[in-house]
Amino acid sequence: MTDSITLEVTRYRPEEESEPRVQAYQVPLRSEWVVLDGLNYIKDRLDGTLSYRWSCRMGICGSCGMTVNGEPTLTCSAFLTDYAPGPIRVEPMRNFPVIRDLVVEVGDFMRKLPTVKPWLIRDEPRPLDLGEFLQTPAEMDEYAQFSMCINCMLCYSACPVYGLDPDFVGPAAIALAQRYNLDSRDQGGRDRRDVLNTAEGVWACTFVGECTTACPKGVDPAGAIQRLKLSTALDSVKSLLWPRGAR
Amino acid sequence: MTYPAPASDFQPRWYRRRPSTFWFVERRSYQLFVLRELSSVFVAWFVVFLLLLVRAVGAGPAAFAEFVSWSGQPWMLVLNVVALLFVVLHAVTWFALAPDAMVLKLRGRRVPRRQIIVAHYAVWVVVSVLLAWLVVA
Amino acid sequence: MTASVDVLVVGGGGAGLRAAIAVVEANPRLSVAIVSKVYPMRSHTVSAEGGAAGVIAADDTADEHVYDTVSGGDWLCDQDAVEAFVAEAPRELMRLEHWGCPWSRTPDGHIAVRAFGGMKNKRTWFAADKTGFHLLHTLFQTSLSYPQIRRFDEYFVTTLLVDEGRARGVVAIELATGRVEGIVAKSVILATGGCGRIYPFTTNANIKTGDGMALAYRAGAPLKDMEFVQYHPTGLPFTGILITEAARAEGGWMLNKDGYRYLQDYNLGTPTPSPVMRSMELGPRDRVSQAFVHEQEKGRTLESPYGHVVHLDLRHLGAELIDRKLPFVRELCQRYQNLDPVTELIPVRPVVHYMMGGVGTDIHGATGLPGLYAAGEVACVSINGANRLGSNSLPELLVFGARAGAAAAEFASEVSLPAFSVVSRIYDEQQRLERELQRHTDGGERMADIRTEMQDAMEQHVGIYREGGALAKAADKLQELRERFDRAGIDDHSRTFNTELLAAFELDFMLDVARCIVACALCREESRGAHQRTDFPRRDDDRYLAHSVIHRNPDGTGRMEYAPVTITALPPAERVYGR
């Protein structure tokens, strides 16, 4: 087995160039190393000018999403040996503007997230002295999957609709809205509907399904969106037929 | 109280990659997706064809015969075979995705994906058998 | 560019988010902002796994939680702070539940609690084994419902602004543009977390570089109990990734190379098939980590390509329990160790995990510098004393985040905005940062090498067991590294998202914090909790039942003194585990 592997890394320094270019680096091919370890080796030993985000290196903080050999990937969870003999193409996440090298601008998601009201909405706040809302394990299972989102945005990177129509609210934001919609303690379904039941909400989605494929945490945002389409459509029909009674 | 701004601000230039018109070519999953979307056109064609057939039936035996010979032309046959393939693709892909939209619970447990898909095919078979019997008998 | 707010929170993790919400709730007319070098959902709170302790079971009492915490801290905890903490923790955790946190439940829908190390009763609330993840995301998403909370995401704070003896705000670099921004404030809350990255093997993320501790130290707020660094007994050998204590709480065993449950040799009780509270694998972290060192000295640990390890055995727990209670542990082992804990042994070793020491605060989160508050791992109140019990730090974020928020809000409503003179300090800092940006490599050293040498020196000389001579060597080494750092350079001189410059600032902070750790460790000539001296193996309450406090002298060296520990209901006694 060779002891090194080539990483072809997209570089972009806005102060120096107007277009990205590719730079190749040789890094040691160690069995326990992930792509992120390769990038750290480059930065520490070869070229300190390479910029990228990372933090926890255990797949829970969502910082290190990039495009590896064309696939949206968390570089802390992708082992070099899985790509051997290489070379490995490392590019920034797609569908986001590139600030620098492998760092993309994610402000769009950060602005969209609050619009879907991803927090528990109650008609009346519950006094602390009354203790917890009762919620059985079965009720928790209803939304548990959608609560696993680490906001890594690989789903946005994978979604062709988002790539073509940046106004689309997007998979992760809608999945988080659905997480609260399905939480038995929540009473905010109607509040979220106004944002979700729009042309840029669930109806922009054409169910390509790439978001679910890309998700490293098994959240299934595509499923969340389709279920929401069904439930909002049914609600629209209900409110047409029973304008006052629908809730 | 306002504070003065310092001398120079630097605003970097973000790079935005233009999505290509043929974005769907680069991945198999995108290709399949576009084919699936395209299949709706052929579904629409079958609807139109069916309406033409109904109109021909209603307009009398002569019109019906004309319709049948028109449908028998080679290019029509090719078109309808292609359309049939696309409609089958349409049905297969949408049946496969049905469990994502329909989350059913029976006695507290989620109905497995497989059963939902199988149920769709079962209904399809039943309806098809029914229609075939109506037409033939 | 300069912005101004009433209360500025530095750090967007559990403590920072809770503090910001507390400010809004205390006084909705105050403006509050969170400045963080990463987006809040990336904060290291997200990696916490095991749980958060709060007394809710019918057979549990606050007094017992206090006793467990104080004895776990080897009597270095301020007992008034612990009492307040224990009283407020359940309410804070319940508040999180009302905000939507998916705490795991009993079959009838009530909050479930589990056992945890050093605790006599089951009182640890948990959200599967991703408690920190759910806590952080619940807090972050709830914070989005408060439009008054403004955020400066991906701004790196380089200095605290101090004028006329008060904290007046910060200067920060906007990473995306390289723009240097002054943010003036009436009060500042530090919630920047710990400093695990000073060591080479740590559960901590890359961002845990002791920024807030160094910022406070340089601004004149003293640091407290810096020598107390916690090693978590079960980290994976290469990556240092955390295998939660919950694995032991659910019944996991620690085995040496002979398959023997070695903790029984270290005054931690006798082995039983299922876990017994405060005994064996449920002992406090410092004692369990220390046992590893002794086993290694006796040659009873296993050699792995990444150093010595012991085994964590979860096989007897069964796949069903592991998938239900420890799914993330299983996933981490499969991905990073290529093994399945259901059928195989997990290699583990002690890795640096938590910093008991930090910026000294009172029970309201106020530091030694007026207008500066601190909460969370960056602070030392102290409720953790010489050793923190597992599942106490998540409620600490909430309780003291809320307290610091309320106190900072009160302070801000009583004072006026900083005077114009603070602007000149902002300009000074901008000049300094320009110079830092232009540092050339020119055959000088790489920052990465200095960082690696610092980490190795800390692990070698300031580890689980310390000794005067080794500590002195560490002090000299850090002095040498500081000089080499001042002469070292960076490759990257661009302004846009310059992470190399960031890493240089972080290394600068880490060197300061490391020196404080070594100085405090040298002065404390006793063994207590996580600070063990082979040359002073006894606990010495006569001389050292006190907090180490270190102030910065103008020339950068530290000045040590000792501050008394508040003792209320529990006079110092022996720590007893296993019986």
Image (spheres, coloured by chain):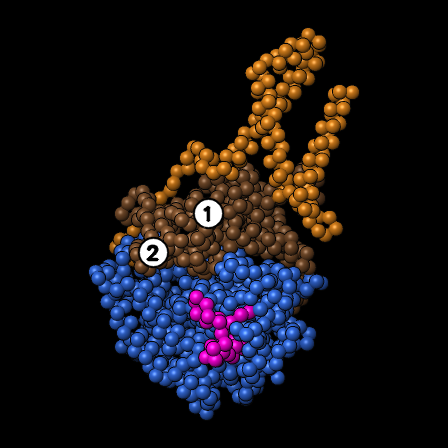
Left or right: residue A107 versus residue C341 is left
Left or right: residue B42 versus residue C195 is right
Q: Is residue C108 magenta?
A: no
Vertical placement of A199 versus A56: above or below? above
Residue C471 visible from this viewpoint: yes
Could you tell me which residue is drawn at 49 percent across and 60 percent down? Answer: C336
Where disc 2 sits, the SS reads helix
Same-chain check, marks 1 and 2: yes
- Give residue B27's position: percent from left, percent from top: 47, 38
Label 2 sits on residue: A42
- Give residue C508's position: percent from left, percent from top: 32, 68
Label 1 sits on residue: A72
Vertical placement of B121 versus C500: above or below? above
**Chain appearing in brown on the rendered image:** A
Amino acid beneath label 1: Pro
Where disc 1 sits, the SS reads strand
Crowding around mark 1 (Cα neighbors within 10 Å: few <14, some 14 to 19, many 20+) is many
Please report the bounds of the magenta region as a residue range.
C283-312
Tag 1 subunit: A
Could you tell me which residue is drawn at 64 percent across and 42 percent down? Answer: B99
**Chain appearing in orange on the rendered image:** B
Cα–Cα gap, marks 1 and 2: 21 Å
Vertical placement of B73 versus C366: above or below? above
Q: Is residue C292 magenta?
A: yes
Q: Residue furthest top?
A: B62
Crowding around mark 2 (Cα neighbors within 10 Å: few <14, some 14 to 19, many 20+) is some
**Chain appearing in blue on the rendered image:** C
Q: Residue furthest front?
A: A1
Query: Foreground: C218 or C444?
Result: C444
Between marks 1 and 2 in the image, the one whose residue lies nearer the viewer: 2
Amino acid beneath label 2: Ile
Could you tell me which residue is drawn at 40 percent across and 60 percent down? Answer: C37
